[in-house]
Image (spheres, grey):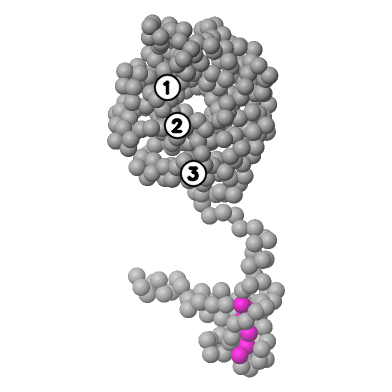
């Protein structure tokens, strides 16, 4: 069931219109990105964007070259069959297939072509007619929040919760590219605290050379990460926020480093032998303060604690009011007291019985 989809450690590569209306170029982007992904043990997805340009653009504005997005979308138009070829390549390359629809007709096409996940772009975050159509599908949903107010985010989360949808909310800043000082990484904390049962992600538009924000996002507990991708080609210039395979490799390496540094979260980490040995050199050993006789108990007034501690020596860390140490031999002043020369009685169980 798609509703059981696990968002954890999902890395999404967004093609958007970087295929440039050239099917071969789009396929090459997918293949080159897939080569990089083989070096890393994450879940990877590739994402397309669908717009039914025949109805998405108002009839009176078709062909306008003075309106940025109309010009961009019309110049990079692909046919339905070509989009299907891109989706086939996505799946053949081992990616989870994701698509962002910008109108209801595109949702119909996503359903027809059987994508794995559906993505809501920030500009459509509160496009309620579109959300209603998307909610009719049994698809996991990822939604970006750039430009949305907290009240609007609440409304969309409630909308999907009431429909029992498996969904993820992405922190996103809709500046292309996003300057470091405008990344607002603390919003991941806000979303996590406000929606504790919802997967939170990070959709990025920062410069391709920024490999710090992914580490911060991971440290803050984000589960899903999205990056625009492209490849260099003489006739197709790169935009300022899309990453080449080389940059993607460094981005993923930064993510891998962050996970390694983050370590274990659900239980206490495995303490290494080196850590034990390094710390032992800083611990105080137990030494005889006075001449001690066999049969005597160790007490505060007849021992002292100092470094260095010796191999096999009783440590200050071992001293407890619930443990009784009885000497099994005589000790001279300043002599290290070794564990092998002690009889040890743990009194904790007796104390607990008395308390009960």
The quarter holding residue 236 reads top right
> Dot 2: what SS?
loop
| Overall secondary structure of the magenta section | strand
Residue nearest the observer in this picture, 169 or 70: 70
Instruction: List the residue tagged with mark 2.
Output: 174
Nearer mark to the viewer, of 1 and 3: 3
Question: Dot 1 surroundings within 10 Å: few (below 14), some, or many (20 or more)?
Answer: many
Real-space Cα separation, disc 2 to disc 1, in angstroms: 25 Å
> Which is in the foreground here, disc 2 or disc 1?
2
Q: Identify whether 186 is placed above or below 270.
A: above
The answer to the question of whether label 3 and label 2 lie on touching residues, with beta carbons closer than 8 A, is: no
Residue 293: x %, y % from top left: 62, 92
The local secondary structure at tag 3 comes to helix
How many numbered circles are shown? 3
Reading the image, the residue beneath label 1 is 139
Which stretch did the figure color magenta?
284-289
Task: Residue at 50% x, 10% y: name it.
Answer: 74
The question of residue 340 being in magenta is answered with no
- Tell me residue 280's x, y (percent): 64, 70
Q: Quadrant of residue 344?
A: bottom right
Residue extending furthest toward the right: 311
- Label ID, residue 181: 3
Location of residue 336 in the rendering, given as x and y in whole percent from the top left corner? 67, 83
Asked if residue 88 shows in the view, the reply is: no
Distance between the Cα atoms at labels 3 and 2? 14 Å
Q: Earlier in the sequence, mark 3 or mark 2?
A: 2
């Amino acid at each position: 069931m798609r509703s059981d989809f696990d968002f954890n450690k999902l890395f999404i590569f967004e093609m958007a219109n970087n295929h440039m209306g050239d099917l071969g170029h789009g396929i090459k982007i997918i293949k080159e990105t897939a080569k990089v992904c083989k070096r890393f043990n994450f879940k990877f997805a590739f994402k397309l964007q669908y717009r039914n340009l025949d109805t998405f653009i108002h009839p009176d504005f078709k062909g306008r070259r003075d309106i940025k997005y109309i010009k961009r979308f019309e110049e990079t138009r692909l046919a339905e069959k070509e989009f299907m070829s891109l989706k086939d390549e996505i799946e053949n390359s081992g990616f989870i297939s994701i698509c962002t629809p910008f109108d209801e007709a595109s949702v119909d096409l996503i359903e027809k072509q059987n994508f794995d996940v559906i993505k809501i772009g920030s500009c459509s975050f509160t496009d309620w007619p579109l959300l209603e159509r998307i909610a009719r599908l049994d698809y996991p949903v990822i939604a970006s929040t750039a430009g949305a107010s907290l009240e609007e985010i609440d409304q969309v989360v409630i909308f999907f919760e009431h429909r029992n949808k498996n969904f993820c909310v992405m922190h996103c800043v809709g500046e292309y590219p996003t300057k470091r000082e405008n990344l607002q990484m603390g919003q991941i904390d806000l979303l996590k605290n406000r929606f504790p049962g919802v997967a939170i992600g990070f959709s990025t538009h920062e410069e391709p050379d920024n490999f710090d924000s992914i580490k911060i996002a991971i440290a803050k507990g984000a589960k899903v990460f999205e990056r625009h991708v492209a490849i260099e080609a003489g006739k197709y210039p790169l935009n300022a926020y899309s990453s080449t395979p080389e940059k993607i490799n460094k981005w993923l390496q930064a993510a891998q480093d962050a996970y390694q540094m983050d370590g274990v979260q659900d239980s206490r980490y495995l303490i290494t032998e080196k850590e034990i040995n390094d710390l032992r050199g800083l611990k105080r050993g137990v030494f005889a303060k006075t001449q001690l006789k066999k049969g005597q108990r160790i007490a505060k007034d007849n021992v002292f604690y100092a470094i260095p501690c010796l191999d096999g020596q009783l440590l200050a860390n071992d001293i407890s009011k619930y443990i009784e140490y009885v000497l099994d031999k005589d000790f001279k002043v300043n002599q290290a007291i070794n564990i092998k020369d002690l009889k040890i009685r743990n009194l904790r169980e007796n104390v607990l019985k008395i308390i009960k």
